[in-house]
Structure formats: C-alpha cells, structure tokens
Image (cartoon, rainbow, N blue to C red):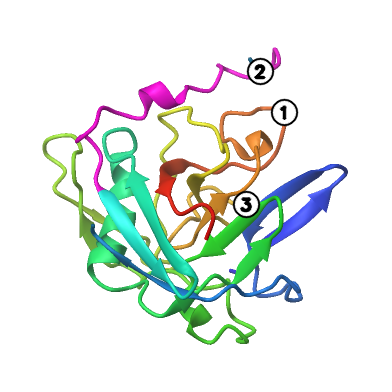
Amino acid sequence: KKKKHKKHKKRKKHRKKRRSSSSDSDSDSGSGSGSNGSGGASKPAAAVGEEEDGAAGDNPRVLLKTSMGDITIEVFLSRVPRTASNFLDLVSTGFYEGLHFHRVIRDFVLQFGCPFSKDPASPEAGTGAPPPASSFPLLGGAEGEATVTRDSKGGTIADEHVWRRSNSIGTLSMANTGDPDSGGSQFFINTAQNTFLDWFNAETEPSHVVFGKVVSGMDV
C-alpha cells in the first residue's frame, strides 16, 4: 500500500500512499541514514505534555545523517516500547541506509523510511515496509514478550494506542495507510501543530502514534 496525503476541507490527512493511487508531486529532500547515537468534548482525554516524555536516560537517541545535515532524535522507548523497538531495530539493521525523504510538504510533514525511496524517482516510493514476518527484540517492554513478529503479509506492526502524545512540531509519528495496524517502517517529522493526526482525537479520521521527537537539527 502506498502512503497518501489528502486535503479534507482545511484539514490534511497523512497516510501511506496506496498502490492504486496516482503518485503525488511532493518534493524529495536528500537522503538519510539512521544510527544509534483541552480538546473538545468528544475527545477521550487531553494530550500529555513534553514533561511526560520520560526522564533523561530513559529514552535512547538516534542520529539521522542526511545530505543536508544531521538530525538527533529521542525515541520514546519508555512510553511506546513496541513502536520504538520496531524503529530502533530498523536503525540497527541498516534498513534506513541510503533512503530519501520521499515526501516533503511545507508546514506539514517530512516523510521518510520507504525502502523504495533509494530511487527518489521510483513510482513505488512511499509503498514499502519491512520484510513480512520479520522479527525484532522488544526493548523496555513487559516481561515475557522478548520479541515481536511483524505481519506475515505486509511487514507491519500493531498500533500502540497507549500514550496520548500529540503530533506537535518536531515529533516523529508512524505513517500508515489509514487502516488499523498498517504502520511499518515509514514515519514523518511534524513541521506544524498537526493535532488532527492524533490517534486519540475523535473529531478527525487520521490516527498516528507519536514515538519520538527531534532534539536537534530541526533547521536542517
């Protein structure tokens, strides 16, 4: 499935493009690789603040080296261990090496993580995911669950709707097709206050789990 972004009145939806959709004309912005280094009455609860991201040392950091500069990311392993462990596994195994930001939308998001984006002109850029049925170690998770196996068909993981962190500027969030449990390797960096993308916002359709934030390099 291809990650797709649409406009809906004044709101934007952020999704994986679907293979059956025509490709968008969003610009490419260089390549990158990873290395370890309130609401309305219909909302179930208000979003948590940055003070709940976890104490210093609780969360690992990753250095994303791009052709335009370095970006340092804090990964919320202590809050969303499954989603964070999936990302950290892809980093440690070199999955993100040589990929491009295949979607750059001004004042919205920067999207990354599709294996087909090694060729930024590929019509399949935005459709890829990790290998089906691949596994990764669960870090910082509950006892008794040592590994997680991705979906046998799409290489995706289950949505981790356990922590209400909003899609605020500088946060990293899982991209998906719009269907439940359809996130895999692709994620986006929010460059605007995209609260309508919050999974816990019952007033809007998009549903995206925040699993990290940029701690330096937002000016890249």
Few, some or many C-alpha atoms within 10 Å of disc 2 (few <14, some 14-19, many ≥20)? some
The residue under label 2 is 39
- Residue 212 visible (yes or no): yes
Q: Which residue is mark 1?
A: 203
Residue at 47%, 22% in the rendered image: 49
Q: Secondary structure at mark 2?
A: loop
- Indicate whether 73 appears above or below 3: above
The reply to whether discs 2 and 1 touch (Cβ–Cβ < 8 Å) is yes
Numbered circle sitting on residue 178:
3
Q: Are marks 1 and 3 in contact (CB under 8 Å)?
A: no
Q: Main secondary structure of the magenta part?
A: loop
Q: Which residue range is magenta in the image?
A: 40-60
Q: Is 48 in the magenta?
A: yes
Packing grade of label 3 (10 A; few <14, some 14-19, many >=20) is: many
Q: Nearer the viewer's eye, disc 2 or disc 1?
A: 2
Q: Is residue 56 left or right of residue 113?
A: left
